[in-house]
Amino acid sequence: MREYNEDTMHSRLTIIKKTENADGALQIAEKLPEFFDAGGLKSIANDSKTQTLYGAFDGETMIGFAIYKEINKDAVEMCWLGVLPEEQGKGVGAKLVEESLHELAEHYKVCEVKTLSDTDPYEPYKKTREFYKRMNFTPIETISPYPGWGDNPCQIFAIDMVAEVKIIQSSRHHSRP
């Protein structure tokens, strides 16, 4: 299953839900300059209003976001993911991805995500790729350079959402006393 632990999360319950809080998503992204440049921020501002936005909330405060875009009737892409720097490493991102994918699995079979490839030495994305692997995403291919990304190489990951939901449900069922 996942490596997040409820004991490491906030004393208040972190709630994952669909939201229209596009401003909250952009504010989080602005605090992550090592991941989102001006072009990325502009895209997040647009996509958070036009695509499916999920938020992680501590009380009324958004502490993380994930934006999904339909590729076709069977597939969705996680376009953007961000968690406040001070909330990283506490399981917020894992819970956000797991619960949003669980809900999206009612409509889609596969989710893909694109990130900077491991052929690029930029250090912040090493943790990003490790995170996706922990979340059971499989690296599919690297395209270099990726169209629209300048000279940057793109690593594409995918996850079988139907199988993942079955694993999550089985794990929850077997972990009950």
Image (cartoon, helix red, strand yellow):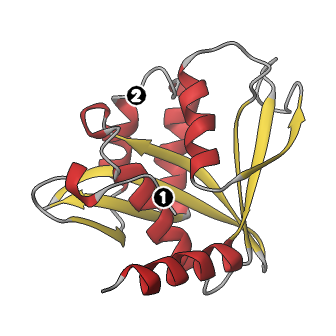
User: What residue is shown at x 81% (from left), y 25% (from top)?
Assistant: 153
Q: Position of residue 26 (x, y in %)?
A: 38, 42
Q: In this view, does 169 lie to the left or right of 30?
A: right
Camera-nearest label, 2 or 1: 1
**Which residue is rendered at x = 59% and y = 26% of the image?**
125
* Kind of residue at badge 2: Leu
Estimate the x, y position of residue 66 in percent, counting from the top left.
48, 55
Q: Mark 1 points at which residue?
A: 2
Q: Badge 1 local density, few (<14 within 10 Å), some, or many (20+)?
A: few
Quick one: 25 or 58, which is closer to the camera? Answer: 58
Q: Position of residue 108 (x, y in %)?
A: 70, 79
Residue at x 56%, y 35% (from the top left corner): 128
Answer left or right for 71 relative to 49: right
Q: Give the label on residue 26, or none.
A: none
Q: What element carries label 2?
A: loop
For marks 2 and 1, the one nearer the N-term is 1
Kindly state the secondary structure of the residue where label 1 is placed: loop
Q: Are marks 2 and 1 in contact (CB under 8 Å)?
A: no
Q: Would you place residue 51 above or below residue 161 in this image?
A: above
Instruction: Pinpoint residue 50: horizontal percent, then vertical percent.
Output: 54, 62
Q: Which amino acid does label 1 sit on?
A: Arg
Q: Quadrant of residue 115?
A: top right
Q: In this view, does 39 lie above or below 170?
A: above
Identify the residue position indicated by label 2 in the image.
Answer: 32
**Quarter assignment of residue 90:** top left
